[in-house]
Amino acid sequence: MAEWIMRQLPALIILVPFTAAPLAYLLGTRFGRPVGFISALLSQPLAVLLAITVMREGTLRYEVGGWGGPLGIDLVADGLTATMVLVTTVVGLFVTIYALGYFGDRERYRFFWPLWLFLWGSLLALFFSGDIFNLYVCLELVSMSAVALVGLTLRREALVAAMRYMLAAILGSLFYLFGVALIYGAFGSVDMQTLREIVRADTTAQAALALMTVGLVLKTALFPLHFWLPPAHSNAPSPVSAVLSALVVKGSFYILVRLWVDVAQPMAFPGVSTVLGILGATAIIWGSLQAFRQERLKMLVAYSTVAQIGYLFLMFPLVTGGGQAATDAWMGGIFHAVSHALAKSAMFLAAGLVLARFGHDRIDGLAGLSRRAPMTAMAFGLAGVTMMGLPPSGGFVAKWLLIRASIEAGQWWWAVIVVTGGLLAAAYVFRVVGPFFSREPEGIDDLDLDPGRSPWAMEGATLALAIGALLLGVLGQPLLDLIMVSAPALVAGVTP
Amino acid sequence: MSQTDLYTLAGAALFIIGLYGLMTRPHLLHKVLALNISSAGVFFVLVGIARRVPGTTPDPLPHAMVLTGIVVTVSSTAFALALAKRIYSETGIAALDASDVDAEENAGG
């Protein structure tokens, strides 16, 4: 039995949420909740087992249905896959616990559970994809369920935000698919392992990479293609906002990393990775300034995502030279994706609790939260520590690695951006946390939470994610080791 | 110029026409149709690529990809239309931006 589980692990991990999703739909609201919760619980040991197995044995390859390439679909898990699966599963569990209380058994939110489980499974399938066409299918699955979740409340603003998100998402996927078609035309394969060995720089290949990059950058919401993100992420119900910012944007980023650092590396223009870095740097500065200017808490947190996505892209110019700088940039970039996932989901979940308690999320009206809801205020503050990149948080480790990489690569200007971004993050985090700890004005009715909800579990889940982001800084070494398992040659210390 | 190149260029032209429509037309129905034109362009490229080695049997794999792509596009189009319809019934305007007053007139035309 144990051996069977080990062999079937990649398929089992994906099948848990994909089985639960239609079950949750068929069984309706009352049973949808337990189905979601059980699926979230079952996923935990499987994701940990995957991480341990990959750590011990290196890359796992699984032929779906025993078909094998080139006709079958292969699932592949290396250190990067295991890392992303682990963070998705952990964030997924706490968002699920929060959502149990947040949505309750209200009939109008009955589609949350099937859609969320479907999104969960699609993300996992994306991280396991071994070929670039299957990545396209998974990207679409992720987008469709994410768009539906944004429009879940059927509020006017949410519907328009969902539509804008959907048009951007489909366009991004089409750009990507165009690139896939050209790659297949040029090299006759979509399997990433095969492509890695046969790609070479020619006009078609470079056009393909350019198309795929534009599509994925649009889907990752890198400045200046971020226009759809703030309305979509801020108008979604809070558990959905958390998942979108923490995990969904990382899905398309993951494909960019696979292409740029690994598979398509030989055919990349050297200048383009610098352009990606410059856009990332602009995103950090511009997104942080926009976050500071917002009047609503959820908009602030959404613009903070625009800024934090920028850090991920600093990785690209820093890995091109190889050597120690590439290793540090690789670890820093992926580690940032992980710690941001934990901290940002905590922030959005906290914002949801604030909305429930105050009935609004205007930042100037949030005085006294620390007295009314100390756990929520603390969760937001702790998540802020990671956003700012202060020790001992996960954000600190990530930024420190990026700074070290930029000095080793002799490109010190990226380090300046990282430090400036941290200061700007401090500015927008304190703009929110400051009022939390001030005395509330007299004569405001205490809008308390709906008694049907279970605020302690929601607050607990939020705080757990924030503490997780903080602990990553202290206990992050095993994760850094996992990120390096079967890492691409460019970043594994092999000089090109 | 080979047959495949011709298909690729025609597909690229369709893709760009769709992209232009998506960016310039405010009406949601036009945007959804524009995306469909773009995806037809990409499918065109894939179909053409199946013949990339002249004189041999066409490669079935790109056709399988197009089939998958069509399934994805049909579902996403259905969903986008449902969303557009819902937006129209909630706001009375079938556009993303309420300031696009022309959009309502476009609805008839």
Image (spheres, helix red, strand yellow):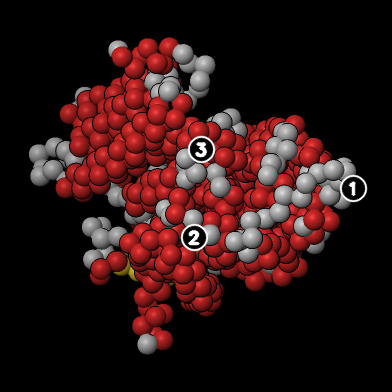
Residue at the (44%, 30%) spot, across then down: B90
Residue A272: percent from left, percent from top: 55, 35
Residues marked 3 and 1, same chain: yes
Give the crowd class for mark 3: few <14, some 14-19, many >=20 residues within 10 Å.
Answer: some
* Quarter containing the N terminus of chain A: bottom left
For label 3, the SS is loop
Residue A258 at least partly seen: no
Which amino acid, mark 2? Asp
Quickly name the residue at label 2. Answer: A105
Residue type at tag 3: Arg
Q: Which residue appears at 44% of the width and 58% of the height? A: A113
Name which of mark 3 and mark 2 comes first in the sequence. 2
Q: Is residue A111 above or below residue B67?
A: below
The disc, 2 or 1, on the residue closer to the chain's N-terminal end is 2
Left or right side of A108 for A417: right
Q: Position of residue A433 (x, y in %)?
A: 81, 48
Q: Which mark is residue A439?
A: 1
| Label 3 to label 1: alpha-carbon separation | 33 Å
Image quarter for residue A479?
Answer: bottom right
B39 or B103, which lies in front?
Answer: B103
Q: In the rendering, at what x and y percent does residue A32 appear? A: 42, 64
Residue matched to label 3 = A155
Number of numbered markers: 3
